[in-house]
Amino acid sequence: MSAALLAAVAGALLYGSGTVLQALAARRASGPGVLRHPWYVAGLGCDLLGWLASLVALQSLPLFTVQALLAGSLVVTVLLARVVLHAPLRRVDAVAVVVVVGALVVLAGAAGPESLVRALPDGFTAIVLVALGLLAAVTAACYRHGPGWLFALLAALGASGAAICARAVTLPAGAVSGELVRAVATEPLAWAVAGFGLLMTVAYARALERAGVGATAAVMAVVEVVIPAAVGLAVLHDSVRPGWPGAALVAAALALAACVALAASPATTATGHVPVVPAAAR
């Protein structure tokens, strides 16, 4: 298993664990005290490490593989919530867990070789920055009275934008720390990763308030995979292994359907009292 694939799996494990740790803290504290609870701080640490792991994976793996694996963090959340939070596990949840794991194995195997062509299409960065501005404007305009489904969609689009930008950024190979910092500081797409991540955090928190954790998780599981995968294949030179497109398409559809089922699980709902969400491209 490649280092990038291990990083993507680690990201899913960390995100799922972070969600459960934050929910555990919310059960043991209330109000602002939740933010200071050790379990909550540990959960944020898992989220941060998961985000860093996803950035490592996105440097060499196709977006459809990384995003599908990260969506699989719902499996980790459901299983851990069963053990830690004593949440019920339905028969359909058990089936969905098996389907997701099997589908993700297929998607990992379907990843084609990394393209030697990394040049971005003309105007790509400008389009990304305009999209970020539009999403931010809609979020601000609708923040007080917008419906929950809209904020779930905005959060998913923010997370998708962050993943796309992280995949598109090309950092100088072999650069020492100072050169790397300067390269990141002068790269608009690197700043866009942070912008999309911030937008995702704000919209996700609002979506949890108005749509609930199940509906929000379902929307994000689908949008976070479909949009980045389409952009990666059409624009960013991602590829599928020869002979595997059909298997990858079926696996992606099964994984998304199973993730939607897990989003409605009582185990997922049991984590829905977390007041703050990961501040990155989840």
Image (cartoon, rainbow, N blue to C red):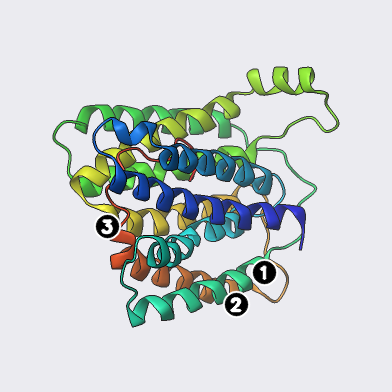
Q: Give the amino acid type for the residue marked by disc 1 in the picture.
A: Ala
Q: Any mark on residue 215, and which?
A: 3
Residue labelled with disc 1: 110
The residue drawn where x is 32% and y is 36% is 34
The residue drawn where x is 33% and y is 61% is 268
Q: Is residue 221 left or right of residue 153?
A: right
- The answer to whether residue 114 is visible is no
Q: Give the amino acid type for the residue marked by disc 3 in the picture.
A: Ala
Q: Give the amino acid type for the residue marked by disc 2 in the picture.
A: Ala
The residue drawn where x is 63% and y is 45% is 53
Q: Quadrant of residue 276?
A: top left
Q: Name the one closer to the observer, 14 or 187.
A: 14
Give the vertical position of 187 relative to 56 (above or below): above
Q: Is residue 97 left or right of residue 274?
A: right
Q: Quadrant of residue 182?
A: top right
Q: Where is residue 174? Give x, y as percent.
A: 86, 31
Q: Quadrant of residue 67?
A: bottom right
Q: Where is residue 248? Give x, y as percent.
A: 59, 72
Name the element at disc 1: helix
Q: Where is residue 81? Give x, y as percent.
A: 39, 62
- The answer to whether residue 196 is visible is yes
CA gap, disc 2 and disc 3 = 28 Å
The numbered mark, 2 or 3, whose residue comes first in the sequence reads: 3
Question: Mark 2 or 3, which is nearer the eye?
Answer: 3
Q: Name the one closer to the observer, 33 or 207.
A: 33
Give the vertical position of 261 relative to 232 (above or below): below
